[in-house]
Amino acid sequence: MRRSRARNAAAVALAAALTAVTAGCGGGTTTDSEGSNDKPKELTYWASNQGTSVAHDKKVLAPELKRFEKKTGIKVKLEVIPWSSLLDRILAATSSGQGPDVLNIGNTWSASLQATGALLPWDDEHMAKVGGAERFTPSALAAAGAPDKDPAALPIYSLAYGLYYNKKMFKDAGIDGPPETWDELVKDGKKLTGDGKHGIALEGGDPVENSHHAFILGKQHGADFFDASGKPTFDSPGAVDAVKQYVDLLAADKIAAPGNAEFAKRESVRDFAKGKAGMLLWQAAGTALQSNGMKSDEYGVAPIPVQNPGSGEKGTRSMVAGINLAVFKNTDNIDGAMKFAKFMTSDEEQRTLNAAYGSIPPVKAAQSDKAFDTPDLKVLREVLTTSSAPLPQVKDESKFETLVGNATKDLFADAAAGRKVTTESVAKELSAAQQQMRK
């Protein structure tokens, strides 16, 4: 048994605790014995790490939070939490009741966290306080909670996956343009591999990235990873084909470096920016690439390839990626939290924050700004609108990311160590993940 299996078990136990939590958690402010808020002019806010570093996020957010304080008189205590620990922190907060008033969540966690009852539901009354649901793009709202329920959070940053390619490396290899199918991607990747460089950079050591690509490719192979009743189908033929195809970029096709099996924390972005790989699969990578020294005219962006040109779910090119803003239901400063949510989703703030992070505003009116008319964001916005799908909005979605992501990580480790990755070995890993899901 490899060590990641032990991590899987721990993650499942933690995620299972998530679904058992009641809504008895308080916000970040305190109350006296009469139940009144002793700090009505203060909010605590957990922000996700959207920028190139925690310091970058503080630099982006600090002046905006000052503007909110000047406008409302409410001071916001900010903590930026890295993605590697954000879900664990949220789970601990829902269990202990020692959480913030407002927080960012990955939109893929919306249904899982909604199932705890710990988040404020955005019903018609609450939605009216931020201008109504019609302000948001339908794709972003589709990833804000379980179907047929009020959203558990509000979209604030929208993202989509794209295929980034190094223009000079493509030209030098005699490649006319980005691949449109996976067969073309592998063919181009082999032309780009050699002399210490590789066709594509992957983040094989990051379970979340792995699960996202498994989902996208799963859709292209006709697999959903959950059936209509919400039961896991991790080892269906389509799911097995999807995960094998992704791992084979390193294992069989050998267009990714063996070291990519351990890559996490944007190491693949750095390799691509430094010209060590000709292609990259990433969500709105422009800001990160430029912070690593790559100029915007040195790379192009295209939709992620499909199996064969077509439409429908098999033409899925991205998950609906993004970040949502949630309010703990039992916050002691609901009025302040509502004002903050309205501020963060206002047209002006949406333009400011999404421009700073290189993401796409989920608020429709903010998308008309010229900052979002760049060639890369035009491509990603089109993908988000026409060929993306939300990850399964089921209560166990966060466990799916952990289990399938770690199973894929194990398979990458096998490939890097020279062990053969077969259809049977992929099916075995996914079956084991499915068994843990049911515990």
Image: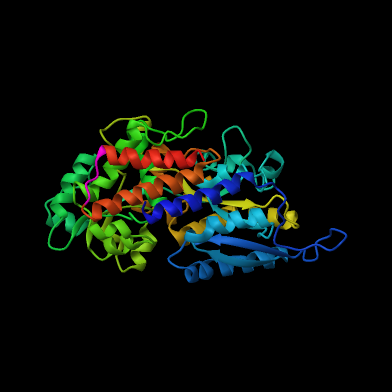
User: Magenta residues?
Assistant: 419-423
Place of residue 342 in the rendered image (x, y in percent of width and height, measured from the top left): 65, 53
Q: Nearer the viewer, residue 410 or 222?
A: 410
Place of residue 21 in the rendered image (x, y in percent of width and height, measured from the top left): 65, 47
Viewed as shown, does residue 2 lie left or right of 146?
Answer: left
Q: Nearer the viewer, residue 314 or 263?
A: 263
Q: Is residue 419 above or below residue 67?
A: above
Q: Nearer the viewer, residue 362 or 265?
A: 265
Q: Main secondary structure of the magenta part?
A: loop
Place of residue 247 in the rendered image (x, y in percent of width and height, measured from the top left): 28, 47
Location of residue 116 by image quarter: top right
Confirm whether the magenta stretch covers residue 54: no
Q: Residue furthest right?
A: 34
Viewed as shown, does residue 417 lie left or right of 136?
Answer: left
Q: Residue furthest top?
A: 228
User: What's the residue at 23%, 58% (across, down)?
Assistant: 277
Q: Does residue 378 appear in the picture of this structure?
A: no
Viewed as shown, does residue 392 lie left or right of 40?
Answer: left
Q: How is the image coloured?
A: rainbow
Q: Is residue 259 above or below residue 5?
A: below
User: What's the residue at 60%, 32% (across, down)?
Assistant: 148
Place of residue 203 in the rendered image (x, y in percent of width and height, measured from the top left): 33, 55
User: What's the residue at 45%, 39% (across, down)?
Assistant: 435
Location of residue 205 by image quarter: bottom left
Q: Nearer the viewer, residue 135 or 109?
A: 109
Q: How many marks?
A: 0
User: What's the residue at 45%, 54% (across, down)?
Assistant: 7
Location of residue 242 by image quarter: top left
